């Protein structure tokens, strides 16, 4: 038979289980702290991305507006040149006919 009484075996078994549970709880707490840290980093990155995206959107809108005006100016210049050429051609044709 065993030299240790059954009651001590049961107590040791319970204490071993308690130590195992304590170890698991320590691991869980460490994981929780790590997750909280990761969450804070993720939140900071999210805020940075949001700020960057707002700046990008503002810059893109300004660039779009600037390019629209540039395109309008170019279109007006082309139209003015075409009209000037047409006026010159028409005058070249009409003026000799009136003489």
Image (cartoon, rainbow, N blue to C red):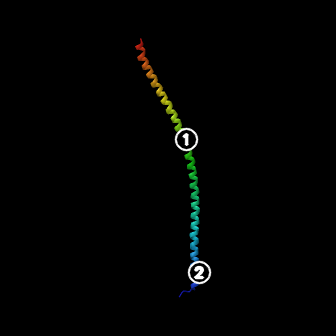
Say if 56 sits above or below 95 in the image.
below
Indicate which label's residue lies in the foreground, 2 or 1: 1
Which residue sits at x=56%, y=52%? 46
Q: Residue at x 55, y 46 (%)?
A: 53
Relative to 54, 98 lies left or right: left
Q: Which mark is residue 49?
A: none
Instruction: Report which residue position mark 1 lands on.
Output: 59
Q: Residue furthest top?
A: 99
Q: Quadrant of residue 38?
A: bottom right
The percent position of residue 72, horizontal first and vertical second, equals 50, 32
Confirm or deny contact between disc 2 and disc 1 (CB under 8 A): no
Residue 47 horizontal/vertical position (percent) = 58, 51
Q: Which SS class for mark 2? A: helix
- For label 2, the crowd category at 10 Å Cα-Cα, with few meaning under 14, some 14 to 19 and many 20 or more, is few
Vertically, is 38 above or below 89? below
Whichever of labels 2 and 1 marks the residue nearer the N terminus, that label is 2
How much space separates mark 2 and mark 1, taking CA atoms? Answer: 71 Å
Image label count: 2
For label 1, the SS is helix
In the depicted structure, whether residue 39 falls above or below residue 62: below
Q: Is residue 91 above or below residue 35?
A: above
Tell me where residue 32 sits by quadrant. Answer: bottom right
- Give percent across and percent down for residue 17: 56, 75
Tell me the crowding category of disc 1: few under 14, some 14 to 19, or many 20 or more residues within 10 angstroms, Cα based: few
Give the residue at x 58% y 84%: 7
Q: In the rendering, which numbered label is found on residue 11?
A: 2
Seen from the viewer's position, the closer of residues 57 and 1 is 57
Residue at the spot x=46%, y=24% of the render?
83
Q: Quadrant of the C terminus?
A: top left
Q: Position of residue 4 (x, y in %)?
A: 57, 85
Of all residues, the one furthest to the bottom in this rendering is 1
């Amino acid at each position: 038979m065993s030299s240790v009484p059954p009651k001590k075996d049961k107590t040791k078994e319970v204490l071993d289980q308690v130590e195992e549970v304590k170890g698991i709880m320590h691991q869980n707490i460490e994981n929780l702290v790590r997750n909280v840290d990761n969450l804070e980093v993720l939140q900071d990155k999210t805020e940075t991305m949001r700020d960057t995206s707002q700046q990008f959107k503002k810059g893109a809108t300004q660039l779009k507006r600037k390019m629209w005006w540039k395109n309008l100016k170019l279109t007006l210049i082309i139209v003015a040149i075409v009209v000037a050429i047409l006026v010159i051609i028409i005058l070249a044709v009409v003026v000799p006919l009136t003489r």
